[in-house]
Amino acid sequence: MSGALPPYSQSTPGLGLGLLMDWMQLAWGRRRVRIWLFVVAAVACLLAFSARPEGGWLTQLHGGALVPSVVLLVFGAALLCEYVDSSLGMGYGTALTPVLLMAGFEPVQVVPAVLLSEFLTGIAATLWHHRDGNLNLLVDHEARTTALLIGGLSGMGAVVAVLLAMLLHTKLSSDWLSLIIGLIVLSMGILILVTLRRRFQYRRSHLLAVGAVAAFNKGLSGGGYGPLVTAGQVVSGVSSKQAVGVTSLGEAITCFVGLVAYMLLGGGIHWGLAVPLTAGALLSVPVATLTVRRMGETHLRAIVGVVTCVLGAIVLVKLLF
């Protein structure tokens, strides 16, 4: 976690002051990790104790039998998946949902719990990205414009989700839609890698196109949002660090609207799943944003490109086999 020294001392007239600031930044990073490890261990113990079959409060919230090992699996899976998501802007729902289904939870339990955890984590990740200097919505006009465009389109995509499903699923094969999205995601990943050291010119028109496609896909299939939005921002001229932060905010808006719609339609939240899921996801954020802060722009962009290619390829492989 220590990494290379930030370039503060190179641009500060007083070398002594610059070295002092470098040391303070690194020391705070190490201190954050130590505190984080302690809190994660404490929360894991608390969750395991509260999931006792003989009357733990989490078992009572769940309304049925809970196994501490399953609760810890959910907590750990959410911690890992959200760390990747908050670091790269993609991967939380895509990787986590199958794990929850294999653990024995029903889709009706998984969907609202994931929406709730991703909404709260998206807000937390946006604030931590701002705190760590990866994103500044107050000062940076470009970042603010990007966030408004992506956030607005994300909200609209969630609002029309049911309508899109009703109008299009009966006319267009879901396999064809998945094929198109998979090809788009894979193409964006390849483009990022091929143009790794090239700085794209910032284009709002590209962001509108990316946001519209991502909102369409999210509303229709419920997935593929992160890779499309994060990679799409990079190829539209947004820095990788800003793209990750903006994606967190966009996902928070999308999940909030989706959760409200779900509740209005009579759905409920299964707190026995939602509590460990949300706890694990939230606890990943401080270390994930620290990772983004310490990682070089080119390295982060390369990782985003590789992960985008992998996710796009997975979609295509699933369709073929």
Image: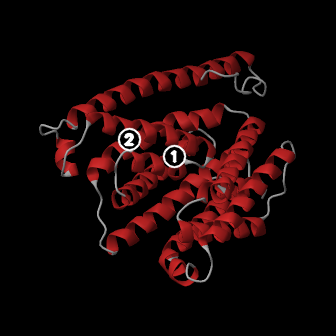
- Residue type at mark 1: give it: Ala
Q: Which quadrant of the structure image shows residue 207?
A: bottom right
In the rendered structure, the answer to whether residue 218 lies left or right of residue 181 reads left
- Residue type at mark 2: give it: Val
Element type where label 1 sits in the image: helix
Q: Give whichever of 108, 214 is nearer the camera.
A: 108
Q: Earlier in the sequence, mark 1 or mark 2?
A: 2
Question: Disc 1 designates what residue?
Answer: 125
> Is residue 15 depicted above or below 247 in this figure?
above
> Across the whole image, how many numbered discs are drawn on residues?
2
Residue at x 61%, y 48% (from the top left corner):
89
Q: Give whichever of 179, 54 is nearer the camera.
A: 179
Question: Disc 2 designates what residue?
Answer: 74
Residue 234, horizontal then vertical, whole percent: 75, 52
The C terminus - image quarter? bottom right
Spot the residue most to the top. Answer: 16
In the rendered structure, the answer to whether residue 229 lies left or right of residue 262 reads right
Q: Nearer the viewer, mark 1 or mark 2?
A: 2
Label at residue 234? none
Asked whether residue 137 is in view, the answer is no
The N terminus - image quarter? top right
